[in-house]
Each structure stands twice: as structure tokens, then as C-alpha cells.
Amino acid sequence: MSIVRSNGLGQFQQDNATPHASRVATKWLQEHSYDFRHFHWAPKSPEMNIIEDIRDAFLHAVENRSPPPRTPMDFWTALKGE
């Protein structure tokens, strides 16, 4: 994750395909869960578009900023920062 995000924090999308949900993969994800945010999906879900989850994660991060953005430009700057 440090390669993808300079702060080492990122998001991981698990599609729960059979090989990705194996005991070995599941154990690795649990052992490394502090390295990234893990989006959970229903097993073998046909819906793999994560845009709504990504949007929610960005909005949550921006809303938790101190001080919160007050203008559209402040919001845009905070969003780009996240």
C-alpha cells in the first residue's frame, strides 16, 4: 500500500472470488488489516463498482477535517487532499 499511497493508507476491494476467499488469503487480510481499509462485498457479487463506497470514504474523511471546509473551494481542496 505504501507504493500506491505515500501515507501507506489505501483501500482494498475484495471481490470474494473463491481463490481470494481461501483460508490463506483471508488470514493474510486479517493479519495486514491495519495497512489498508478493506471494503467488504457479498460473495461473488456482480456489483463490483466501488464508486459509491469511495465517495462515502472521501466525504467521511473531509467531514472529519478540523476545521471543516466552509466554501466549495475549501471542500474541493480538502477532497483533493484526501
Image (cartoon, rainbow, N blue to C red):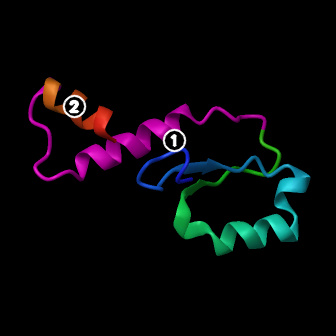
Instruction: Tell me: 62 left or right of 71.
Output: right
Return the x and y of residue 26 as percentages of the image width and height.
Answer: 77, 67
- What residue is at 54 percent from the left and 44 percent from the top? 4
- Left or right, 78 with reference to 71: right
Amino acid, disc 1: Asp
Q: Mark 1 points at which residue?
A: 53
| Residue 75 x, y percent position in the rendering | 20, 32
Q: Which of 9 and 49 is in front in this view?
A: 9
Is 53 left, or right, of 22 in this rendering? left
Identify the residue shown where x is 75% and y is 46%.
15
Compared to 67, does 69 lie above or below? Answer: above
Front tag of 2 and 1: 2
Span shown in magenta: 46-72
Picture quarter with the C terminus: top left
Please state which of residues 52 and 21 is positioned toward the viewer in this rendering: 21
* SS at mark 2 in the image: helix
Residue drawn where x is 14% and y is 38% of the image:
69
The first of marks 2 and 1 along the sequence is: 1
**In the image, farthest residue toward the top:** 73
Is 61 colored magenta in this rendering?
yes
In percent of width and height, residue 61 lies at 32, 48
Tag 2: Cα neighbours inside 10 Å, few (<14), some, or many (≥20)? Answer: few
Q: Is the residue 59 above or below the residue 33 in the image?
A: above
Residue 1 image position (x, y, % from top left): 57, 53
Mark 1 residue element: helix
In the figure, residue 23 lies in which quadrant? bottom right
Query: Can you identify the residue that label 2 sits on?
Result: 77
| Amino acid type shown at disc 2 | Thr
The verdict on residue 66 being magenta is yes
